[in-house]
Amino acid sequence: MSDFLYDRLADEFAGLIAARVLQPGERLPSVRRLAMQKRLSVSTVLQALRQLEDRGLVEARPQAGFYVRRRGRAPAEPAVRGKLTRPTFVGVNQLLMQVLHANEQPGVLPLGAAHPGPGLLPSLRMQRMFAKVARGRADLLAVGSCVRGNDARLVRQIVRRSVDCGGPLAADEIIVTNSCTEALNLCLRAVAGPGDTIALESPTYFVLLQIIESLGMKALEIPTHPRSGVSVEALELATRGGAVKACLLIPNVNNPLGCIMPEENKRAVARLLAERNVPLIEDDVYGDLHFEGARPWPIKAYDTSGNVMLCSSFSKTVSPALLVGYIAAGRFHAEVALLKTLASGVTGAVPQAALAEFIEGGGFDRQVRHARRAYARQVARMSDAVAEHFPADCLLSRPQGGFVLWVEMPRQVDALELHREAVAAGIAFTPGQLFSASGRYRNCLRLNCGNPWDARFDAALRRLGELVRARL
Ligand SMILES: Cc1ncc(COP(=O)(O)O)c(C=O)c1O
């Protein structure tokens, strides 16, 4: 037996892995916990883990700790799919409602909608914030205003946070909205009308397509790389000649691909669209949920002419039930503010005040730190399960944040047909067809990793893998 404590610890874990007491994909206890349990120093434990890594038995995952390595290879990543074609009217609404309805049947496992797991949201702390605000500020429950709907403290916090990502935003260009969805609707209506063409990433979040459909606009799908996001060259080509009226992008943690555009591409897109006078509506709802490094900047940070309308909300970080989002509308502020007043008056005073209280007290920063680590872990766990249970030639995204995964299956597999079978087996997911205006991604699907992993998810992924194989 070695004299070195780290050798002995590494051997102990190697034995547990060989005996499959520790299973492939399983997370090891944290370094700190191991140090406490084994009465060893943190550096000794780290040395043991590094040794296990060198032996190929464990792997370190960013923000998530050490995991027992799976023996199989990691699935390859999808490539850019689809070419730049013509703008098309969108027809996803009916199909989408059917899929959402099926996914929400009682007892169906929630791998469909991109919802954060309820246990990961700060619901109890928000309950206290609401109670405090309602007790101390009865005026908020009685007095309304049709024009001054912003809570000044909340706006201050939004501005303060924007300093960390290329800001600061100007307080007087911010409009607080009821969700990011409302923000996106208002911005689109401010700059485009029926029949106009809107350029978007492909694949893209289906609600963006739905909004375009409901406003009678056309979608132009721009090829998008699963790592670096929308193709700047294709966007340059698409915006020649003035046919594109506006652009609608998710540059930070695209839904469904999970990619973050490199900063130089963001700068190039800001410049290109400003030069061509094409307004950009930027959806930054996942920007705080990046896995590594500093908070990625929005394209808005590179905008010098007010051409970018930044839209976001607290749905993915605090709660989708809160219904608080915002727009920094740049030079379109007056149009957007009018549309907001006509659409819904103002945004609820109590939720805004409760949120301001939460952010001011440091709760938001703590929550985001915790959520980023949890989602990185959950995405890693789900990726392992796809690698283990799906056919080897499936391709899998490597998200840089958020909590969804994108799987490309062999061409024979129709995701809508698979979806019908999966729902009958009690498993939801979102079929790829919904992420395109022109029926692309027939053989793709999106999985929600918002919920903490447990045995039900492993069984569901195994079953889903069997259903995919049965179609080959
Ligand atoms: C990219 C993107 N934008 C916006 C939203 C919706 O945000 P909200 O709930 O604030 O309307 C979602 C929700 O899934 C999303 O994925």
Image (cartoon, helix red, strand yellow):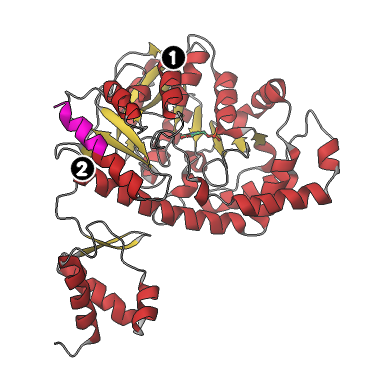
Label ID, residue 389 = 2
Q: Residues within 10 Å of mark 1 (few under 14, many from 20)?
A: few
Q: Amino acid type of disc 2?
A: His
**Of 333 and 76, the residue lying toward us:** 76
Q: What secondary structure is the magenta-colored segment mainly?
A: helix
Q: Amino acid type of disc 1?
A: Gln
Q: Does residue 243 appear anywhere in the picture?
A: no
Image spot of residue 418 (x, y percent): 27, 25
Residue at the spot 78% in from the left edge and 29% down from the top edge: 147
Numbered range of the magenta stretch: 463-472
Q: Residues within 10 Å of mark 2 (few under 14, many from 20)?
A: some
Q: Which residue is mark 1?
A: 94
Q: Is residue 293 above or below residue 86?
A: below
Q: In this rendering, would 364 be left or right of 415?
A: right
Residue at the spot 14% in from the left edge and 37% down from the top edge: 393
Which numbered disc, 1 or 2, marks the residue closer to the eye? 2
Image spot of residue 343 (x, y percent): 68, 21
- Give the secondary structure at mark 2: helix
Determine the CA span between mark 1 and mark 2. Answer: 31 Å
Q: Where, by quadrant of the figure, is residue 338 drawn?
A: top right
Magenta includes 16? no
- Give the secondary structure at mark 1: helix
Q: Is residue 281 above or below residue 154?
A: above
